[in-house]
Amino acid sequence: MKILSIETSCDETAIAIVEASGGLKAPRFRVLENIVSSQISFHAPFGGVVPNIAKREHLKNLPVILERILANSESKISSSKQAQNAAGKTPNMKVDAVAVTVGPGLEPALWTGINFAKEIHHNHFPGSKLVGVNHMEGHLYSFLLTQKSQFPISHFQFSRAKISPAIGLVVSGGHTILLLLKSLTQWKKLGETRDDAVGEAFDKVARMLGLPYPGGPEIQKMAENGDEASIDFPRPMMRGKNYDFSFSGLKTSVLYYIKDHESQFKSNKFIEDVAASFQAAAVETLVYKTAKAAKEFKAKSIILAGGVAANKALRDALQAASHELHVNFFAPPMEFNTDNAAMIAAAAYIQILKKKNRRIAAQANLTL
Ligand code: KG4
Ligand code: ZN
């Protein structure tokens, strides 16, 4: 099944074409086209995402990206045919489904993607299904994506027995969720953050340190040269009985530490040590609770997903913990950690197989 997917929930405008096969037992995804256009430079001066700027940029970017995607894909189908203008003539390519993120996310941003999806579905792919997708399910399934060059060698010759029960840790700019997956399609939420999402904490701490938005990759960079043992930041709720998280106390401790050491603020070493010590505290909390859940529920695998899954310290620590527990560790290929449309196609395929229909309307607070 060929799926054209659209993602506009936040500050990335993304479109992909993905070939999905294998059914619910062993889903496989070959990413044929994948374009992500980041709006970071427009939002960075404001230190975060501005919804109306996101909407304006999505409106501008969507037709341009679609045109490029269709041109790439059609030039592969027939080199003699000129690529069609996406806004005008009907493309030669056939798709089985048009998928679009309906939430969670910024409402004005979500609507631009939804309206665009409806329009191209109606104008160009009227025989296909129109599927509304939960962005967080996209993240969750992103570990199943394979770059086109790798196909058909599946990095993923798994049997379901090796995956589930699984513990899923979904960590992004808006969410920090721990899941127990009975199967790839059935899960229960074990816990989530009670305040800030971990990605949000990375972004806020980066801002305190004078680093640009988005802060996660910047903290990671600074942390590489820092001493993570130099400052003993708290690990909030780590030893608690439940599987919830809290990152606001950690963020406040960093703020007080910076205020108390104002005279050192200009030194690079200071920023590197704060970044490394903060990252170590956040990673330790996430890994401790994930490993504890894996033990308690006798998991066969640990699945890491979401933008913060790009963090090397977190990936390495969770991989090491999985190894120690003798469970498999799955994380998305690097290009599919942060927001992209390929993951939306993956979630759409599974949703189609489950015969689940979702409202094609923005649902800003949709959850897992
Ligand atoms: O999943 P995502 O792209 O968007 C949301 O759905 O929120 O996640 C974005 C979040 C941001 O908070 C960003 O700072 C964080 O992921 N992030 C990272 C890294 N790369 C992105 N956090 C820590 N280390 C990274 N390397
Ligand atoms: Zn996301």
Image: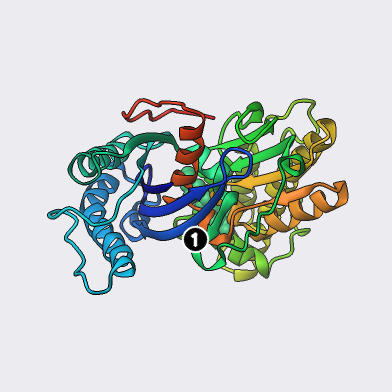
Above or below 355: residue 327: below
Viewer-proximal residue among 222 and 155: 155
Q: Nearer the viewer, residue 30 or 257?
A: 30
Residue farthest along the left direction in this orientation: 88
The C terminus - image quarter = top right
Under mark 1, the amino acid is: Leu
Name the residue at 16% across, 60% down.
85
* Percent position of residue 47, x then y: 40, 52
Q: Is residue 274 left or right of residue 342?
A: right
Q: Is residue 241 left or right of residue 185?
A: right
Q: Which residue is mark 1?
A: 211
Q: Quadrant of residue 228?
A: bottom right
Query: Residue 102, image x and y in percent?
Result: 37, 34
Where residue 260 appears, as percent x and y from the top left, is 63, 51
Q: Position of residue 271 (x, y in %)?
A: 61, 63
> Is 323 in front, or is 352?
352
